Image (tube, rainbow, N blue to C red):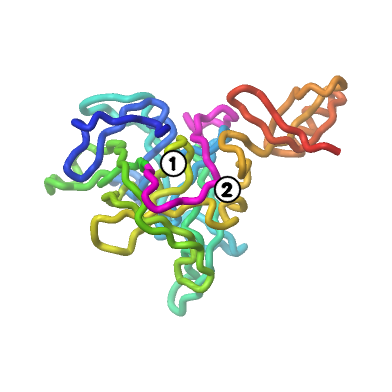
Amino acid sequence: MFPVNPDLRTINEDGLFIVQDEKLTSTILPLYSFSADDPNARPDGHGTTFRIDPWSRCATAYHVIEDLVTVSRRGEIAAHPERRLVSLELPEVSYGINLVGPENWRGLTELFSIFAKEEQIFADARAKNFCELAVLRLRPNGQITNNAPYLPVRLSGWYPAAGEPVMAFGYADLDLDKKKDGDTRPIEQRLYGSRGRITQIDPADGESSRPWPRIWVEADWPGGMSGGPVFNAAGEVIGLVSSAFNVGERACATFFSGWNVPQHIYGSLDALNPGWFKVVGAFDSEGNLRVVGQGVEEVREMARSENFEVAMVTYNPSDGSYMRPSG
């Protein structure tokens, strides 16, 4: 089932409803950027990201961050030196105006995507959108952890059908100055949900300038929701809110199972089993899993003192179950 079942009386004229579920507000976050030259200036709101594994990785749509990244000297994607990409993480659902301190901002520590390098004559090379997918690392409470909250993501084994319902979440109209109050106004962010039915399916097309697979939904997903998770009726994240490039009462999402690129970008996820992850495990002499981590060398070092055996496994943190390849 979908993560929430909204009261029909709470859905506004745009088909949006406010979300106050703590699981969703702790895993779906707004993205902002600060000026590197003037960190005291008001941040700009950009879109939505959501947590996908216990190690602080988050997914978002590439177009949300496209203007905030550049190509490094090593030819890799990197944060633009003039901007600081951050998320605002509040500890729980709150009401009214709340004081936001430095401890609530989560700075970007890692960034990865598959992009197209576009050379420019009078400017630095541009990291052009190639797959509409990006992965960020935003640590909860600013700390390294293997226990961050996350959403169950299905990368394969699902294919959309016309008429099928989906539900999207994101920070619609994130910090939009609707009343023209200027930069002195409070930062405004509300997590919204929206439900709609699939009306069209565009498969991946390597010849297109936007080659990623898309579904079109009978819904209105405003700016700010871009990058947010899209769920199927089984409660699995099957894609993310994308840029529609169209005007009208249709929204657009990039769905993961339409090609294999997401499996390369979101490499920590088990593609077939939502909520399971690819990890390095250390086993004692009786075959019991004793240590779990993401880094091979780290786990080997921890296992060396105990004479544990190290192997790759898929792991479900919610109950500690695991699958170890035979042989």
Residue of label 2: 156
Q: Secondary structure at mark 2?
A: loop
- Disc 2 crowd, CA 10 A, few/some/many (<14, 14-19, 20+): many
**Please, what is the three-letter code of the amino acid marked with disc 1?**
Asn
Looking at the image, residue 143 sits to the left or right of residue 45; the answer is: right
Which residue is at the front of the view, 142 or 137? 137
Q: Secondary structure at mark 1?
A: loop
Residue found at x 44% / y 51%: 161
Residue appearing at x 40%, y 31% in the figure? 3
Disc 2 marks which amino acid? Ser
Horizontal and vertical percent position of residue 263: 60, 50
Q: Is residue 148 magenta?
A: yes
Residue 67 falls inside the magenta stretch: no
Is 268 drawn above or below residue 247 in the view shown?
above
Q: Is residue 123 left or right of residue 117?
A: left
The numbered mark, 1 or 2, whose residue comes first in the sequence reads 2
* Residue 197 seen in the figure: yes
Q: Position of residue 176 (x, y in %)?
A: 22, 47
Q: Residue at x 63, y 37 (%)?
A: 277
Residue 56 numbered mark, or none: none
Quarter of image, res 260: bottom right
Q: Which residue is mark 1?
A: 232
The residue located at (41%, 37%) in the rendering is 28
Residue 48 x, y percent position in the rendering: 38, 45
Locate the N terminus by quadrant.
top left
Return the x and y of residue 319 as percentages of the image width and height.
61, 22
Q: Which residues are magenta?
A: 139-166
